[in-house]
Amino acid sequence: MIQIGIVDDKSLNRKMIRQNLYGIPNIEIVIEAVNGLDFLEKIKEKPSNHLPQVVLIDLDMPRLNGIETIAIATIRYPMIKFIVLTVFDDDEKIFEAIKAGAAGYLLKDDAPDMLIDAINNAIHLNGAPMSPAIARKTLQWLKQSNQPFPSNNSSSDNVLNVLTEREQEILKLLVEGQDYKKIASTLYISPKTVRTHISRIYEKLHINSKAQAIQLAHKYNWN
């Protein structure tokens, strides 16, 4: 049985995905969320044996979009495979999603059979399923190897925007390798205050360790 998550802010889209997966004997939908923050909150309540193995996720959502959600969730839940399911086929979105950690990229107007094949491909073959149109764009980029990898820091900025200016400052010092006492000395605050800020940073970014903070920082080039 493959356990599936659906993250999309539009109820009609979620309903359509459910219908496309209805009756498939080896597929069970275990979580639905209306945006990235909703997903990250709901998944914390799931027991480890009932986490989704594959999450079908939209890109354009309020509060926390798909790319930001993938970047955070793949650090905390590396066993989950995220397949983007969206209407966007522009290069920037594709490559930002791949850089964030997406395992596949499909378009919403792809045939239902392609979605089912993509889920099975990701789980059983450890593949990276893509719509033919997306695969062509990826191949085109690989052929033009002299071109820089498309990049946009907007997702990074949006993730950091959930933090206060002081929290962003402390996070960057933490990523640089400074310990609590050194950060406290640098910013002229107490170690207890640093711990309080770091606790809030972890909560807001849905992570729970310095190692995860560093991984997230590397994904978004926070340096």
Image (cartoon, rainbow, N blue to C red):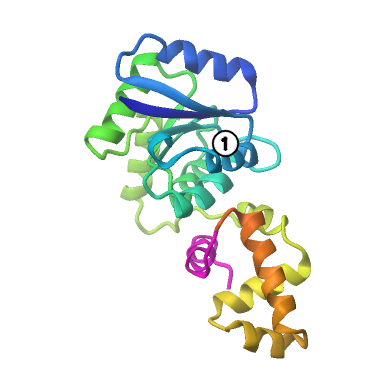
First to last magenta residue range: 208-223
Q: Position of residue 99 (x, y in %)?
A: 45, 52
Viewer-nearest residue: 182 or 222: 182
Placement of the N terminus among the 4 image quadrants: top left
Q: Is residue 100 above or below residue 187?
A: above
- Numbered-mark total: 1
Identify which residue, 105 or 19, lies in the foreground.
19
Badge 1, how many Cα within 10 Å: few under 14, some, many 20+? Answer: many
Above or below 38: residue 197: below
Task: Name the residue: 56% across, 40% down.
Answer: 66
Residue closest to the eye, 68 or 139:
68
Residue 113, position in %: x, y?
Answer: 34, 15
Residue shown at 38%/35% (left/top)?
53
Q: Is residue 203 left or right of residue 220?
A: right
Q: What residue appears at the point 70 percent right and 74 percent down from the top-left corner?
A: 169
Residue sitting at x 70%, y 41%: 63
Residue 157 painted magenta: no
Q: At label 1, which amino acid type do we have?
A: Leu
The image quadrant where one finds the C terminus is bottom right
Q: Residue furthest left?
A: 125
Q: Position of residue 200 (x, y in %)?
A: 69, 62
Q: Main secondary structure of the magenta part?
A: helix
